């Protein structure tokens, strides 16, 4: 990699209008390409997805009427292996969003050195308005529409917003019934009883905690003297907070959509029910109730935004007082805020590394399915630790080689170098 920084102004300029996920992903790609000695033809190929499938999904509602929904599957790049990425059921799903998120999956898989490329898809639907039977019919018909383009060796979906292990079990069943044989490897994030992996659900939060520990170590900050604020006490945030607490950190604030609970002496996070266990429980805990914006501005050592995207923005970044930010959610820091934090010297460990435990244990699940042999939880967690530490070390090396790069740039550089080498080795067909 070149240690010369050669960014063009358009790559680093702050956009005046909010951009689509696809535009942001392209901007980040071009910026990262400025740090690497990479063939521009490879960057050109990475700017667009290989394919975007759009399907119409007719579903019979419980009252006998038929409603049609639009579904997408964007497949960005498969130079390193089959496409991999989530399927979301959400009213805001769009073609452009799926493309942008599929690009991020390509970088995430490459940072983790997994033999996958990026994909993302979903259905434009509010899943809270569907009965369980309607959700099952929607999932099965969507699977049938996508069947020609997904499969254990081509494109492997996983849960995302509005979908869960049950959705994956339905997809596996619908696909397997039509293929004439049980094919668990077509999706990951399934229940363990049908080929899911132990530890899959906890994996993104676990990876956030592992990456936070490595980062604190890098900056010579003992975990036992570290205060932590976690926004979002859901699957990612609660697992990250509980592990950091277990390893000796002082978790002083956690939040859910209703607000945050703060105790400067440390919270008993093991006793706080997660969003899934009891929604709304966070603000009923002992401590001072503050709002989510206040949590972002707490004077803590480490801030982990683990709820939703775009929370550290041009409007909120000046309030952030944490010394280190570790991104548990996807895209919590906007481009503008990233620039401000970089100028202030606040390290932001990016989502593509920090929450990549999810796709990494999905990879383990896929291996277990192919081999028809389940791993123990201990083995999953141990292998995850190894993969996260290896990836963190690769990103650290890239960070140290390019003095002007942020941690996000460094992660993209690692991904881009691997993608570029794979493209150059394979060449362009025909
Ligand atoms: P979740 O639904 O389990 O939990 C989300 C938490 O955030 C809940 O506590 C909810 O109350 C809170 N929340 C919702 N809106 C909020 C808001 N506006 N302000 C503050 N808090 C809010 O979700 P999750 O699976 O933990 O996912 C959280 C983030 O992590 C998302 O960005 C997701 O894309 C990302 N992520 C999830 C996984 C995964 O496998 N679960 C993997 C990688 C990344």
Image: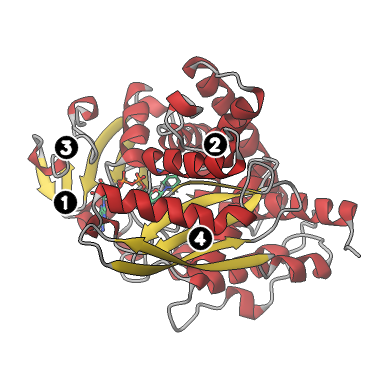
Q: Which mark is residue 278?
A: 3
Residue 373 sits in quarter: top right
Residue 113 or 76: which is nearer the viewer? Answer: 76
**Alpha carbon separation for disc pair 2 and 3:** 26 Å
Looking at marks 1 and 2 on the same chain, the residue that comes earlier in the sequence is marked by: 1
On the image, numbered disc 1 is attached to which residue? 259
Looking at marks 3 and 1 on the same chain, the residue that comes earlier in the sequence is marked by: 1
Residue 336 sits in quarter: bottom left
SS for dot 1 = strand
In the displayed image of the protein, which residue is found farthest to the bottom? 16
**Alpha carbon separation for disc pair 4 and 3:** 37 Å
* Place of residue 320 in the rendered image (x, y in percent of width and height, measured from the top left): 33, 57
Label 3–label 1 contact, CB within 8 A: no
Label 4–label 1 contact, CB within 8 A: no
Residue 218 or 212: which is nearer the viewer? Answer: 212
On the image, numbered disc 4 is attached to which residue? 342
Q: At 51% from the left edge and 72% from the top edge, which residue is drawn?
A: 96
On the image, numbered disc 2 is attached to which residue? 362
SS for dot 2 = helix
Which label lies toward us, 1 or 2? 2
């Amino acid at each position: 990699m070149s240690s010369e920084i050669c960014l063009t102004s358009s790559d680093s300029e702050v956009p005046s209008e909010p951009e689509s996920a696809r535009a942001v992903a392209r901007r980040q790609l071009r910026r990262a390409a400025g740090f690497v000695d990479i063939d521009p033809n490879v960057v050109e190929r990475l700017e667009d997805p290989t394919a975007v499938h759009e399907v119409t999904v007719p579903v019979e509602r419980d009252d006998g009427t038929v409603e049609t929904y639009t579904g997408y599957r964007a497949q960005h790049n498969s130079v390193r292996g089959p496409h991999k990425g989530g399927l979301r059921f959400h009213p805001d799903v769009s073609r452009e969003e799926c493309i942008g998120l599929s690009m991020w999956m390509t970088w995430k898989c490459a940072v983790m050195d997994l033999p996958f490329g990026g994909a993302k898809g979903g259905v434009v639907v509010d899943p809270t308005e569907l009965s369980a039977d309607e959700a099952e019919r929607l999932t099965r018909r969507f699977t049938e529409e996508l069947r020609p383009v997904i499969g254990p060796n081509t494109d492997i979906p996983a849960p995302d917003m509005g979908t869960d292990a049950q959705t994956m079990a339905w997809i596996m069943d619908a696909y397997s019934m039509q293929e004439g044989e049980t094919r668990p490897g077509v999706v990951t994030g399934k229940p363990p009883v049908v080929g899911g992996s132990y530890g899959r659900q906890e994996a993104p939060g676990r990876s956030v905690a592992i990456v936070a520990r490595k980062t604190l170590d890098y900056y010579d900050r003992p975990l036992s003297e570290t205060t932590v604020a976690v926004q979002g006490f859901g699957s990612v945030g609660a697992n990250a907070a509980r592990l950091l607490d277990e390893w000796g950190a002082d978790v002083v604030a956690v939040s859910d959509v209703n607000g945050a609970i703060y105790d400067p002496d440390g919270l008993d996070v093991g006793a706080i029910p997660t969003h899934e266990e009891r929604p709304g429980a966070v603000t009923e805990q002992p401590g001072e109730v503050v709002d989510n914006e206040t949590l972002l501005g707490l004077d803590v050592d480490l801030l982990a935004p683990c709820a939703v995207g775009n929370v550290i923005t041009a409007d909120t970044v000046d309030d952030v007082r944490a010394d280190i930010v570790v991104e548990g959610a996807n895209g919590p820091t906007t481009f503008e805020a990233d620039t401000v934090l970089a100028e202030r010297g606040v390290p932001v460990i990016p989502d593509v590394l920090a929450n990549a435990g999810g796709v990494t244990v999905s990879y383990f699940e896929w291996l277990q399915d192919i081999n028809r042999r389940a791993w123990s939880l201990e083995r999953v967690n141990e292998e995850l630790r190894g993969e996260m530490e290896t990836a963190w070390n690769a990103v650290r090396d890239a960070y140290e080689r390019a003095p002007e790069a942020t941690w996000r740039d460094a992660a993209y550089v690692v991904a881009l170098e691997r993608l570029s080498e794979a493209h150059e080795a394979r060449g362009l067909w025909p």
